[in-house]
């Protein structure tokens, strides 16, 4: 049988669709990966210096399984409850890691402390304190990236670039949080130079953090770039690109909040 072709008469219509979805997701992953490699080559970076993080928010667990079958094990989600539900549904898959990439309300810290392996949107001390407390209770640790508001717009989330060094220094008392780097959403602009300015600001913040140097913290990860701007982000040092639409297709419902 060739499930990928959908030609076998014995598969049901539903199974055929699933097989086609799987093939499509694998093809999209390969296409994005090729664009990552090309973007790396243009600036003399190694292709494996950039991680493709598939963003599975709003997508069913079957989409995660399709990407997992294609070799991916870390998945980006932006809502705690949705992610936790997917993590439970896929608990039988031993090597999945859940990366929370969206703003988190303090009252959801308990949930995230249970199942997430990384949190990329840390931007407040009360949240850091609550995450740390809940992680200690679970006997777990969490890799964290500090979210930066790099667009100088009135974006709701992320710290202003100038506030990041002091914020990073104040995280040292939270033993369960391992600071690994920075995350941002660039300005959603059709003008490359405006987007580029956001990524350049991130590199500047990273440099300042390295100069400051806080024991136990590393700042190697720069999570920036999405479906519309990941090549530009790679040009400016992204180590993680968070890609949803270009892999899984248009989301059928919005994923805000
Ligand atoms: C949804 C989301 C993405 C992926 O966006 P696409 O444009 O679908 O690639 C990346 N980062 C964050 C924080 C998101 O919420």
Image: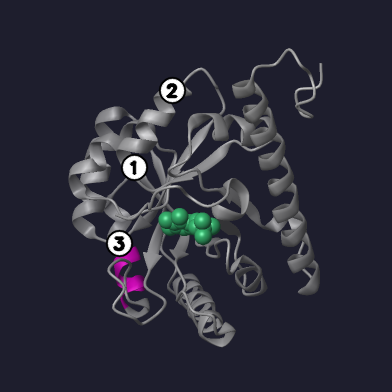
Marks 1 and 2, how far apart at CA: 26 Å
The colour style of the image is one colour
- The x, y position of residue 190, in whole percent, is 54, 80
Q: Is residue 47 left or right of residue 60?
A: right
Marks 3 and 1, how far apart at CA: 16 Å
Q: Secondary structure at mark 1?
A: loop
The residue closer to the viewer here, 176 or 10, is 10
Q: Is residue 10 left or right of residue 133?
A: right
User: Where are the magenta residues, as a range?
Assistant: 163-168
- Give the answer, above or below, for where 75 lies relative to 149: above
The residue identified by callout 1 is 176
- Note whether residue 218 is visible: no
Instruction: Tell me the crowding category of disc 3: few under 14, some 14 to 19, or many 20 or more residues within 10 angstroms, Cα based.
Output: many
Mark 3 vs mark 1, foreground winner is: 3
- The x, y position of residue 247, in whole percent, is 62, 49
Q: Secondary structure at mark 2?
A: helix
- Note whether residue 234 is visible: yes
The residue identified by callout 3 is 123
On-image quarter of the N terminus: top right
- Main SS class of the magenta portion in the image: helix
The residue identified by callout 2 is 89
Residue at horizontal 76%, vertical 28%? 4
């Amino acid at each position: 049988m060739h499930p990928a072709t959908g030609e076998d008469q014995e598969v049901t219509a539903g199974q055929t669709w699933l097989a086609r979805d799987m093939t499509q997701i694998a093809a999209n992953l390969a296409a994005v990966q090729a664009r990552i490699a090309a973007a790396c080559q243009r600036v003399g970076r190694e292709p494996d210096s950039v991680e493709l993080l598939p963003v599975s928010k709003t997508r069913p667990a079957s989409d995660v399984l399709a990407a997992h079958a294609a070799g991916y094990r870390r998945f980006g989600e932006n809502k705690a409850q949705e992610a936790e539900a997917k993590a439970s549904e896929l608990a039988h898959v031993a090597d999945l890691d859940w990366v929370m990439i969206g703003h988190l309300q303090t009252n959801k810290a308990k949930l995230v402390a249970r199942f997430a392996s990384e949190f990329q949107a840390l931007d407040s001390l009360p949240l850091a304190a609550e995450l740390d407390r809940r992680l200690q209770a679970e006997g777990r640790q969490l890799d964290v990236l500090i979210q930066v508001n790099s667009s100088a717009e009135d974006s709701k989330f992320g710290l202003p670039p100038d506030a990041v060094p002091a914020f990073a220094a104040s995280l040292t008392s939270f033993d369960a949080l391992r600071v690994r780097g920075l995350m941002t959403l660039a300005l959603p602009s059709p003008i490359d130079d405006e987007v580029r300015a956001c990524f350049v600001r991130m590199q500047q913040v990273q440099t300042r953090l390295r100069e400051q140097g806080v024991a136990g913290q590393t700042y190697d990860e720069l999570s920036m770039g999405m479906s519309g701007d990941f090549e530009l982000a790679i040009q400016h040092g992204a180590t993680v690109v968070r890609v949803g639409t270009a892999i899984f297709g248009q989301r059928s419902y919005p994923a805000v909040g």
